[in-house]
Image (cartoon, rainbow, N blue to C red):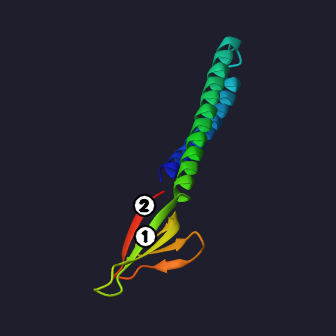
Amino acid sequence: MAAKLLVTLTVVFAAYLIIKRQQTTDLKRLQAKNDATRTNTDERQNNELTTDIRIGAYLFLIMMMTVSASMAYFSWKNDHEKVLVTLYRQNNANVADEKIVFHVYRQDLLERSFTTVDGIKVVVASDERMEIRDL
C-alpha cells in the first residue's frame, strides 16, 4: 500500500515539474519578446536554478523508485516464506488427535484453507485445529 502511495506521489510530482517547466518556458518567451535588453546574467542565474531543480527532481525520483523497489522485494520475500502448518484431527473421543504436517507458502494461507508447496489444496474442517509455525 505504501509503495503504491509513493509511486502515485512520484507521478504527481513529475507531472507538476513538467507543467511548471512548460509555464516557465512560455513566460521566458514572452519576456524575451517584451524586453530585448535583458542582461545575460539574469538568464544565466535562471538557468542555474532550473538545472538545480531538475537535478533535485531526478534524485528524488531515483530515491522514490529505489524505496518502492525495495518495499516490493521485501513484500515478495515475505510472501514466499515457507511456514509449517499442523492440522490436528480428532477421530474418536478415545483416540489421541491425529497430527498432519504441511509446508505452505505464507501467501497461500487463507482463513480456513491453504495450498501446500506441492500444490495440494486443503480445506480445514470445523472440528480440526490448525497451528501455524514459522520455519
Of the image marks 2 and 1, the number of the one nearer the N terminus: 1
x, y (%) of residue 135? 48, 56
In terms of depth relative to the viewer, which is nearer, 47 or 70?
70
Q: Is residue 15 left or right of residue 40?
A: left
Residue 18, above or below 33: below
Please report the residue visible at 56 percent of the width from the left and 50 percent of the height from the top: 72
The outermost residue toward the left is 93
Looking at the picture, which amino acid does disc 1 mark?
A: Thr
Mark 2, residues whose alpha carbon is within 10 Å: few (<14), some, or many (≥20)?
Answer: few
Q: Residue furthest bottom?
A: 92
Report which quarter residue 39 is drawn in: top right
- Mark 2–mark 1 Cα distance, whole angstroms, equals 8 Å
Residue that appears at 33% across and 79% down: 96
Is 39 drawn above or below residue 126 in the view shown? above
How many labels, in total?
Answer: 2
What amino acid is at disc 2? Arg
Q: Relative to 50, is 99 above or below?
A: below
Residue 86, image x, y percentages? 43, 70
Q: Residues within 10 Å of mark 1 (few under 14, many from 20)?
A: some
Q: To which quarter of the image does residue 111 belong?
A: bottom left
Q: Which residue is mark 2?
A: 133
Q: Secondary structure at mark 2?
A: strand
Q: Disc 2 vs disc 1: Cβ atoms closer than 8 Å?
A: yes
Where is 50 relative to 21, above or below?
above
* Left or right of 125 in this view: 18: right
Residue position marked by numbered label 1 in the rendering: 86
Image-based side of 1 in relation to 65, left or right: left
x, y percent for residue 29: 69, 29
Q: Secondary structure at mark 1?
A: strand
56 or 40: which is nearer to us? 56
